[in-house]
Structure formats: structure tokens, C-alpha cells
Amino acid sequence: MDSTNPSTIALRRMNARFDAGTDRINNFMTQQIMGEHPDPAAFMQALEQRSTLQQALQAEFKLNEKPLKTVLTDVK
């Protein structure tokens, strides 16, 4: 896939946001382990955002999967 392809750019942007959400979740758990009391509402928001991004990533991947399968089948 071309790195200037809008779909590729969208996937990279969503993946970066997904990773940032995962980092926020991990930081929350680390704070709890350290005996701190982080905001549970922020934790729930991070979980919801990560779930939504995961669904969006899966949908975007499926949009690109069909043409890729077609290309791979035609090459054989």
C-alpha cells in the first residue's frame, strides 16, 4: 500500500490514537498499583475510546481486505 493513500493515512492515525489510549489505560493501572487514586471516569472514557477505535480499525481493514484478496488471487 502506498504511504500517501488516504486509507493508509487513516489507518496510521487511528492506530496511533489506539496506542495512546492503551497507554492511558496502562498508566491508570500503574497508578493504582502505586497506591494512587486515579479518576475512574477517565479510565472508562479511555476504554470506550479504545473500543470505538478498535471497531473503526477493523472496519477500515475489512474495506481494504477484499481488494487485497482479489489482487492476491489474480496473481496466482
Image (cartoon, rainbow, N blue to C red):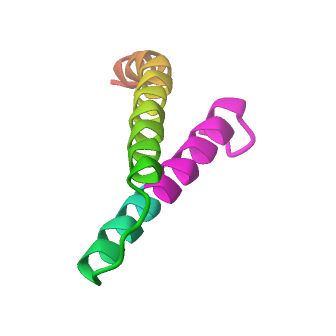
Split into 4 quadrants, where in the image is the C terminus?
A: top left
Above or below — where is 28 with respect to 11? Answer: below
Above or below — where is 16 with respect to 75? Answer: below
Residue 55: percent from left, percent from top: 41, 27
Residue extent of the magenta highlight: 1-21
Judge by depth and name the residue closer to the eye, 39 or 20: 39
Residue 7: percent from left, percent from top: 64, 30
Above or below — where is 73 with respect to 39? Answer: above
Judge by depth and name the residue closer to the eye, 16 or 61: 16
Judged by its main secondary structure, the magenta piece is helix
Judge by depth and name the residue closer to the eye, 42 or 26: 42
> Residue 6 lies in what quarter of the image?
top right
Residue 1: percent from left, percent from top: 59, 39
Furthest-right residue in this view: 4
The verdict on residue 9 being magenta is: yes
Residue 43: percent from left, percent from top: 40, 52
Residue under the image location 42 percent in, 15 percent down: 66
Residue under the image location 48 percent in, 36 percent down: 53
The verdict on residue 30 being magenta is: no
State left or right for residue 67 relative to residue 11.
Answer: left
State left or right for residue 56 relative to residue 9.
Answer: left
Residue under the image location 49 percent in, 18 percent down: 63
Judge by depth and name the residue closer to the eye, 60 or 66: 60
Furthest-front residue in this view: 37
